[in-house]
Image: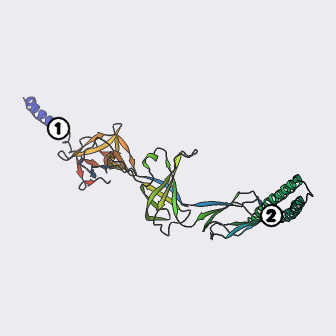
Amino acid sequence: MSALLRSPAAALAGLLLLGGCGKPPPQPPEIRPVRTVVAAATPVRADNTYAGSVVPRYESQLGFRVGGKLLGRDVNVGDAVHAGQVLARLDPRDLALAADSSRANVAARRAQLEVARANYERDRKMLEFGGVSRLALDNSQAAYRAAQAQLDAEEAQYRVASNQAAYAGLVADHDGTITQITAEAGQVVAPGQAVARLAWAGENEVETSVPEDQVQRVAVGMPVEVSLWAAPALRLAGTVRELARSADAATRTYALRVQVAPQPPEMRLGMTASVRIADAAAGAPRLVHLPLPAWTEHDGRQGVWIYDAARQAVDFRPLQAAGVDGDRVLVAAGIADGEIVVTAGAPLLLPGQKVRLMDSPSGAVD
């Protein structure tokens, strides 16, 4: 009987022992704090900016009209010059000798003309008395006319030689600035060979190039915006003045000239400039701009976490990016305006996870 009484007590103790070894009650799921933005589609900015430089609208390649040895130059790169100023000089001795020779030829031809005139006058008078034949008079008259023509030709040649002697000095044809020197003293130059480059004083403009896939967006007369690297805060209104009709054979780009009026004093020759051309086409696509931290990967797919306010939980939504604009991901479809997208804390989330918004959702930045 004592054995029977001990059995219920042992059984009760065993049950109490088993109850003490049970699992603890489950903990509530972790609620993670996150930051969010409100999705809003905005038009895509399709502006293109091209690097260029400030150049003169008109520029001359200056060279001597005759060949010779360069004695020296009187200007340097960057010098301001005025019309009529002598920039460089050739050795004038050979040119002077040629002019002297031509002048001597004129004197000889003039003497020959005097002889031919005297012969003609004598034969004309003698014809009246029968001293010469009509044929002899005609011959002397022809000789006189030929001598006159030879004198005219020699005088013209002398004027050419005199002009060439004056061409020993290279003269600026306009007011402006010397931008390049391509010959030095002691060098023998040919007629027309470039010795200096002259940027005309007055209007400057910006020169740049447009790639062939963007040239259809550009037209002569359209407004553009010009900025200078030396003055980044300065925004200048420009107008497309010239667009090349054919592409450069090496770069496959189209040369573009932009006129800026009025021109500020900060805009100087040779400065680096940028030309911004806005897309004038209507119907530009509207994309959702999301911060880069919102873009994440889950189960091998890329997308974002969408916050459900009713459940206070998040769900992963796979998306396809349409591109990247600076620090933003562009999304064309899959997100509606007003949906809340998680930005900070996205890599640590799980589907259906409860979250707590750290602050009110902010709007997506355009």
Residue 118 appears in which quarter of the rendering? bottom right
- Taking the image as shown, residue 39 lies to the left or right of residue 22, namely right
Q: Residue at x 51, y 54 (%)?
A: 208
Q: Is residue 269 above or below residue 317?
A: below
Q: Amino acid at mark 1?
A: Leu
* Residue occupied by mark 2: 95
- Taking the image as shown, residue 131 lies to the left or right of residue 305, namely right
Provide residue 167's location: percent of width, then percent of height.
73, 64
Provide residue 246's location: percent of width, then percent of height.
53, 45
The answer to whether residue 259 is visible is: yes
**Nearest the eye: 217 or 46:** 217
Provide residue 312's location: percent of width, then percent of height.
20, 47
Mark 1: give few (<14), some (14-19) or many (20+) Cα within 10 Å: few
**Nearest the eye: 158 or 50:** 158
Q: Which element type, helix, strand or loop, lies under badge 2?
A: helix
The quarter of the rendered structure image containing the N terminus is: top left
- Taking the image as shown, residue 202 lies to the left or right of residue 365, namely right
**Rounded to the nearest whole Å, what is the CA distance between mark 1 and mark 2?**
129 Å
Mark 2: give few (<14), some (14-19) or many (20+) Cα within 10 Å: many
> From the viewer's perspective, is the residue at label 1 or at label 2 nearer?
2
Q: Residue at x 36, y 43 (%)?
A: 322
Q: Which element type, helix, strand or loop, lies under badge 1?
A: helix
* Residue occupied by mark 1: 17
